[in-house]
Amino acid sequence: MSDSPLIDSLTAAVEARPDDLTLRLHLAELLVGAGRGAEAIGHAAQVLAREPGNGAARKLMSSALGEPQPAPGEKAPAKPADGVDWAAMEQELGDIVPPRFSDEPEPVRGEEDRTFDIERSTITLADVGGMQEVKKRLEVSFLGPLKNPKLRTLFGKSLRGGLLLYGPPGCGKTFLARAVAGEMGAAFISLSITDVLNMWIGSSERNLHDLFDSARGHAPCVLFLDEIDALGHKRSQLASSSMRTVVNQLLTELDGVDGNNDGVFVLAATNAPWDIDPALRRPGRLDRTLLVLPPDKPARAAILQYHLRDRPVAAVDLGRVADVTENYSGADLAHICETAAEFAMRDSIATGEIRMINQQDVLDAVREIRPSTDGWFATARNVAMFANESGEYDELAAYLKKRRR
């Protein structure tokens, strides 16, 4: 029993007539005035359950919860839909937590604002097995002029230019590019088609420009254009106008129209040089071409040793294996080592005793795996025989003739 007979009487009346919302609201108002907010909340909630939009019940609920009420004639502040006053919270915690949104635009910081992988290669040409002719050409094209600045000045040799590496897949063109960067002590940026192409008009050209700008900003730098036939395909064969503009932008960047390309060494790699736009191979662009062939015997032995070095091996004659793997690419040789390991592991599982990888495992793997370069040479032979009017594939034709013998 309370100390207010009126509240007691109204409570009894509400219990007798629970659907009388006016009576219930009057009782809740008296309870708030008497400081009995918890009881008032229950009655206000009952009204809101029946009439969710009842303003009097909402006001009583707020009063019972202890929220400040606006003065007479003053408009109540709008309450956020999620029930959280973010503005008040940001003001209170502004010294600790940064604001959720900023009206000021983020400043553009130039090439640092773009994300490119600038590497420092630790690989040098000494890590490349064999390929003496390739190394000699690289020394003349790039490394010699860089290491001898006085001679470079005397002979008027520019540090700009491009070299196109082509040949069958899996023969180490990307590895060679990294080795050149490591030999020079230069920065290395590898560019693929996913770094450039974008669905929005003009974005692909801007990405290409930013990549070249980044290379200029980190000179001396080796900019490696992998699968150049995808970015620089013959414009006469392109149905998409957007791809033709990408090729045009690539030509502009190679010419250095918008910036000085001194100190930017452009290396490009492709399996299909015959698909590249001829304009890309004009002087001052990718004007030097280097055929990267399957590894020779010393290189094959070195590759096999590299891929077997951390595996349990017993009495494997690398020289004999190298003799029977002519025309195999570096990737093929790695696959041979992997397959030989599978043979030894299979027997170890079957017998319950660990067995080392032996010569027979490796030779069985050679018999099972055929060289992946055969298909490429079949296509290349047609090009060298019927599409070599300019003589740009003379080196390839000479190799094919020697290979046939």
Image (cartoon, rainbow, N blue to C red):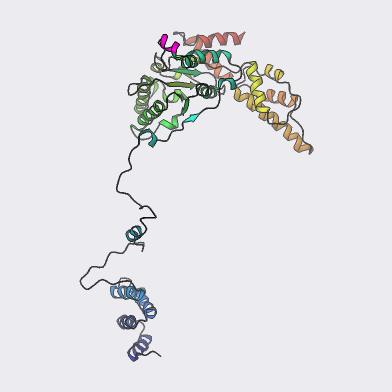
Residue 97 in percent (x, y) is at: 39, 54
Quarter residue 208 falls in: top left
Q: Magenta includes 371?
A: no
Residue in the image at 47% along x and 27% along y: 187
Residue 2 in percent (x, y) is at: 38, 89
In the displayed image of the protein, which residue is found farthest to the left?
73
Residue 134 in percent (x, y) is at: 54, 15
Towards the viewer: 240 or 113: 113
Q: How many marks?
A: 0
Quarter residue 327 falls in: top right
Q: Is residue 40 above or below residue 287?
A: below
Towards the viewer: 24 or 138: 138
Q: Is residue 35 above or below residue 84?
A: below
Left or right: 299 with respect to 197? right
In magenta, the rendered stretch is: 150-159
Quarter residue 362 falls in: top right
Q: Magenta includes 151?
A: yes
Left or right: 280 with respect to 167? left
Residue in the image at 44% along x and 21% along y: 266
Residue 290 in percent (x, y) is at: 50, 15
In the picture, the quarter occupied by the C terminus is top right
In the picture, the quarter occupied by the N terminus is bottom left
